[in-house]
């Protein structure tokens, strides 16, 4: 059986003021072409389909378009679960009716969730969905007195799944969780506030393959067949070095697994550019990827007037500028010591000038400052 495993689409995402819908639509067209070429037995989406519980209209329309293409044109079943960003009830609206068309969406956790059974030439494969749920919700659904944490909730949910899976069939789990040992990114929302949100990967031992969502870096935990596909696109600067992909999974007749990473080409990549401003501007005119989203690390010393405006004339999608040469170490060196309220105005301004320009004030500037301050003090002393 061939499975395309993906997750963390985050449809409707905004990144540093940029709507990502156009970029998501572009890469999802690439995904639809992959479905057409590979002809998988199933597409698995392991949560965080939307970026927030009430997604914008264009995100809903995009999901409708993609699902219609996969289900109607390519006749490929889809197994999807809710993640911690999704609204389970909204995502799974009409799920019983849609299941007849091959769209199996499992939103809220319930004790009576049945496995999705799909068939290939070797027989049945059972897909056990475990949507994201708080420990209290899992405990209430299973009528357990108390589940202490996320790890306990996952263990209880998997035990329930195994009770519903026949003996001897190949088994795939679809979950949304943070497995202990996984590499996180800045764009992932914590799954637990207070206490540990980590889950032990050993709970998934009974399954031939585990399709996971939540972590945005493609990676395996524990064994090769327990896998995060990673997010659809790069959603934070910490993901600049990531290679985003879809996991193409093949199960043989005995349940042995082979996984291949298939890379999709984004419309705009997210890159980091470093150097002096003039060098970056000069090189940018020859850059064939100047439409990419950029974080720029400027190595220039001293103040730069309208740096982002100059950069955007060459790179229109600069999102953020870093100034490492004007970091905390320099700031600590330049600021006056002691209580700033007891420091004279000329000394405060002098420290500010040095912090911004990385140079001390000249005698000419000191004289001009002294004259300006004296004029200001004089105006304050006069009775109006």
Image: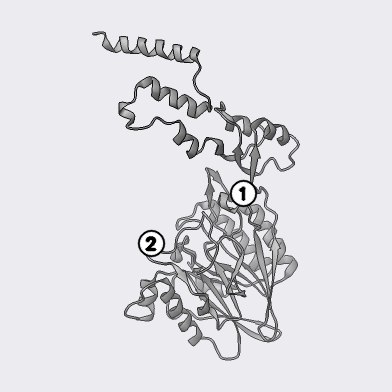
The relative height of residue 61 versus residue 334 in the rendered view (above or below) is below
Mark sitting earlier along the chain (2/1): 1
Image x and y of residue 100, in percent = 57, 75
Image coordinates for residue 226, horizontal then vertical, percent? 59, 74
Nearest to the observer: residue 378 or residue 150: 378
Label 2 secondary element: loop
Comparing 74 with 333, the one in front is: 333
Find residue 31 and report its image quarter.
Answer: bottom right
- Crowd around label 1: few <14 · some 14–19 · many ≥20 (10 Å): some
Residue 239, compared with residue 46, is above or below; it is above
Using the rendered image of the protein, determine whether residue 177 is visible from the camera's viewpoint. Answer: no
Q: Residues within 10 Å of mark 2 (few under 14, many from 20)?
A: few
Closer to us: mark 2 or mark 1? 2
Spot the residue most to the left: 383
Q: Which residue is mark 2?
A: 193
Q: Which residue sits at x=37%, y=63%?
A: 194
Front residue of 58/350: it is: 350
Q: In the image, residue 125 lies at what x, y percent?
A: 62, 82
Classify 63 as above or below 159: above
Disc 2 from disc 1: Cα separation: 33 Å
Callout 1: SS:
helix
Q: Is residue 118 left or right of residue 90?
A: right
Name the image quarter holding the C terminus. Answer: top left
How far across and down, in percent of the image, does residue 202 sit?
52, 79
Asked whether, in this view, residue 280 is left or right of residue 81, the answer is right
Residue under numbered circle 1: 22
Residue closer to the observer: 160 or 282: 282
Rendered residue at 34%/22% (across/down): 344
Classify the position of the N terminus by image quarter.
bottom right
């Amino acid at each position: 059986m061939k499975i395309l495993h993906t997750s963390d689409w985050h449809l409707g995402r905004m990144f540093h003021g940029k709507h990502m819908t156009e970029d998501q639509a572009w890469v999802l067209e690439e995904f639809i072409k992959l479905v057409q070429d590979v002809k998988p037995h199933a597409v698995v989406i392991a949560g965080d389909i939307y970026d927030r519980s009430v997604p914008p209209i264009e995100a809903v329309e995009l999901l409708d378009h993609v699902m219609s293409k996969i289900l109607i044109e390519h006749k490929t079943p889809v197994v999807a679960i809710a993640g911690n960003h999704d609204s389970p009830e909204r995502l799974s609206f009409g799920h019983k009716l849609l299941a007849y068309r091959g769209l199996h969406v499992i939103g809220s956790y319930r004790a009576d969730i049945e496995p999705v059974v799909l068939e290939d030439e070797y027989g049945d494969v059972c897909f056990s969905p475990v949507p994201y749920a708080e420990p209290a919700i899992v405990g209430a659904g299973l009528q357990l007195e108390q589940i202490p944490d996320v790890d306990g909730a996952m263990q209880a949910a998997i035990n329930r799944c195994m009770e519903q899976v026949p003996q001897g069939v190949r088994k795939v789990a679809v979950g949304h969780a943070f497995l202990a040992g996984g590499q996180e990114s800045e764009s992932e929302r914590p799954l637990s506030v207070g206490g540990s949100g980590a889950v032990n990967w050993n709970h998934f031992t009974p399954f031939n393959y585990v399709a996971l969502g939540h972590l945005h870096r493609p990676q395996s935990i524990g064994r090769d067949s327990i896998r995060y596909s990673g997010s659809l696109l790069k959603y934070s600067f910490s993901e600049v070095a990531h290679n985003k992909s879809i996991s193409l999974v093949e199960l043989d007749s005995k349940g042995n697994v082979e996984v291949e990473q298939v890379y999709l080409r984004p419309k705009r990549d997210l890159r980091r550019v470093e150097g002096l401003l003039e060098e970056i501007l000069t090189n940018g005119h020859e850059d064939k990827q100047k439409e990419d989203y950029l974080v720029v690390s400027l190595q220039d010393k001293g103040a730069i007037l309208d740096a982002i405006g100059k950069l955007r004339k060459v790179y229109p999608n600069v999102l953020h500028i870093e100034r490492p040469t004007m970091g905390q170490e320099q700031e600590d060196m330049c600021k006056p010591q002691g209580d700033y309220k007891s420091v004279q105005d000329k000394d405060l301004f002098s420290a500010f000038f040095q912090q911004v320009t990385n140079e001390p004030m000249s005698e000419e500037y000191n004289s001009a400052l002294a004259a300006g301050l004296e004029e200001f003090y004089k105006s304050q002393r006069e009775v109006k």
